[in-house]
Amino acid sequence: MTVDLFDASAMYDDDYLHFFAGPPAKVTHGPAVPTDHGGSPTADRLWRLLDLEPGMSVLDVGCGHGSLANALAGRGCQVTGLDFSTVFLERARSDATAQGVDVDYRAGDMRELPREWTGRFDRLVNWSTAFGYFDDPTNRRVLAEMARVLRPGGRLAMDLDNQIRFLTSWTPSRVTVAKENGDMLVDRHRLDALTGRFEVERTVIRDGTVRTLTFLKRLFGFPELRDWCVAAGFGEVSAYGEDERPLTAEHHRMVIRAVK
């Protein structure tokens, strides 16, 4: 394992659920923050993008609080959800029970998927910028792990920021989310041109308390990520925007589809 580049447990916790897992909050300025983290519209798009069918085995890597995994399970897929956050997994399991769906939620690390999963899944989903949080050799190993657990002919769908659109609209700082009761997330941004990493210092204001954390994400252009996917064991690799059309500079999101 490599040394983590930031404390992910401080980022993906109950505060994150407070701001992002409920009804959409107000984005005061700056680029829009995606709020559909996996509900019905996303499930609809994935169903078409991946040619999903009831009974298919699907692995959601970085499943978060399970909204997408639960939605796919509700449509008849046999879903496994993997995440490192116990807070997220508790929420995912609770929501699955409330919705009457069955998902096998596992605590784990995307850098080293279980050996017994080799060739097990028909489809793999990695959604809402859940890739690119490590150094580049480790990010490439994550892609190789994803390819390993897919069956031959299996398909991967990955949702990320569209680098070109992102760079034309990012701001040095912004109030990312603001709730009516005064709770808010305030972010200060720094882009490292040498690493392609977008570094964020986030101030969390909730219930009258304030804390600061830092996190980063790797920005990818399609040609680079396409080549990484091919090196990891994928064949056909294509990219789409959030409207399912071929990727353009105007799309906010880059959705990768790759076939093992």
Image: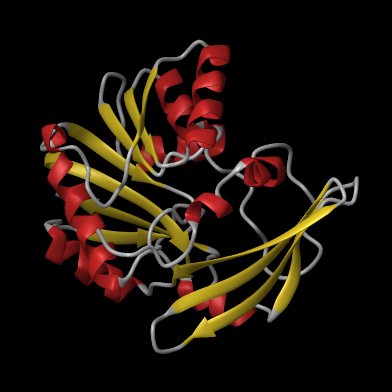
x, y (%) of residue 104?
A: 35, 22
x, y (%) of residue 139?
A: 29, 63
For the residue pair 162 and 185, the one nearer the viewer reads as 185
Q: Quadrant of the N terminus?
A: bottom left
Quadrant for residue 177, please give it: bottom right
Return the residue found at the far top: 100
For residue 117, say whether it is visible.
Answer: yes
The count of marks equals: 0
x, y (%) of residue 75?
A: 42, 20
Question: Is 80 placed above or below 239 here?
Answer: above
Name the residue located 25 percent from the left edge and 25 percent from the top edge.
56
x, y (%) of residue 222?
A: 34, 71
Question: Is 158 placed above or below 31 here?
Answer: above
Quadrant for residue 15, please give it: top right
Quadrant for residue 51, please give it: top left
For the residue pair 195 and 158, the one nearer the viewer reads as 195
Name the residue located 56 percent from the left edge and 43 percent from the top edge.
37
- Residue 54 is left or right of residue 201, and the answer is left
